[in-house]
Amino acid sequence: MARSGRSKSINMAFEKDLIQLPLEQICPLYAVRKETKDTVKYRQVVASIKEVGLVEPLVVVRDQSDPEKYMLLDGHVRLAILTELDEKDAPCQVSTDDEAFTYNKRISRLATIQEHKMILKALERGVPEERLARALNVNVKSLQDKKRLLDGICPEAAELLKDKQVALTGFQILKKMKPMRQIEAAELMVTMNKYTVNYARSLLAATPASQLKDPEKPKAVKGISRQQLELMERESANLERELRLVEDTYGSDHLDLVLARGYVSKLITNARITRYLEMYHPEFLPEFEKITETEALAS
């Protein structure tokens, strides 16, 4: 069978040029809650927009039912702030993917790394560091640290943490590890859903010297002896191996459990089987009922 010589075209995720849209034409997917508006991060973004304008454009998709409307995919906080500031329009990037949830899975949120990218963009536009520091309500030293956030962080680890709220100190701790260990530590953070400085320190403490960027420099962990550190390293290695095994079998195990739950549910809805269990195996029936009530397996 002859193959076509024509190569398949690659669809672009976004339209080539930014467009300036009136805010009234942009339809948000949800309203920003009052709790969000009371956070420090929200106030920082307000101060930044007031001081240097909108650095990161809104991301929208064209409404198929109304050519005059656009659905907002990313930038709900920024849109809320622009509305509060009585702005009339905003620069927008038009996505060609109308799957909002798919897009939101891929886009970097305004987390630590996103803030870092916004700082770099603002500086590239010529905004002075002092002015940007005022906008973010931080001192110049903190701004410079944020600017150098990813120096020494491998791209794979940065990708894993791009939409996570990791403290600046957490990234500084990761920088003490070699790239492969950075990736392992980032994966553990994501799996455990823990991004605290203390958790990052525990991962560093459990990192063998061979996986540190400066293996000659001893790890100083307050209140932990060398023997305890070595034990933590071994336990961490065992935990990571077990985690990989769980990840490898999770999909099939989950499917087996869902099928088993369905089968048990079908059994106990049969009146004859239920009566039989009550007469001859009464200890089984409550356990079967517990299985059928396990919502986590059905989700």
Image (cartoon, rainbow, N blue to C red):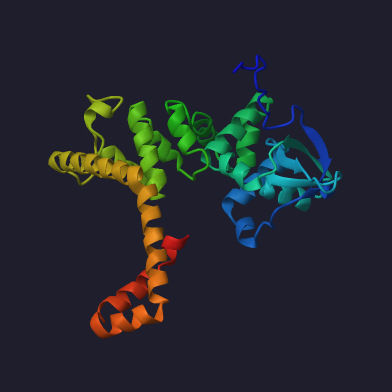
The spot of residue 222 in percent (x, y) is 23, 44
Q: Residue furthest top?
A: 5
- 32 displayed left or right of 176: right
Quadrant housing residue 129: top right
- 79 displayed left or right of 173: right
The spot of residue 187 in percent (x, y) is 39, 40
Whether residue 237 is situated above or below residue 148 in the rendered picture: below
- 172 displayed left or right of 23: left
Quadrant housing residue 184: top left
Q: Residue furthest front?
A: 1
Write the residue at 39% across / 46% down: 191
Write the residue at 62% across / 34% down: 118
- Residue 90 visible in image: yes
The spot of residue 159 in percent (x, y) is 49, 34
- Residue 202 visible in image: no
- The answer to which of 15 and 153 lies nearer the viewer is 15
Whether residue 186 is situated above or below residue 292 in the rendered picture: above
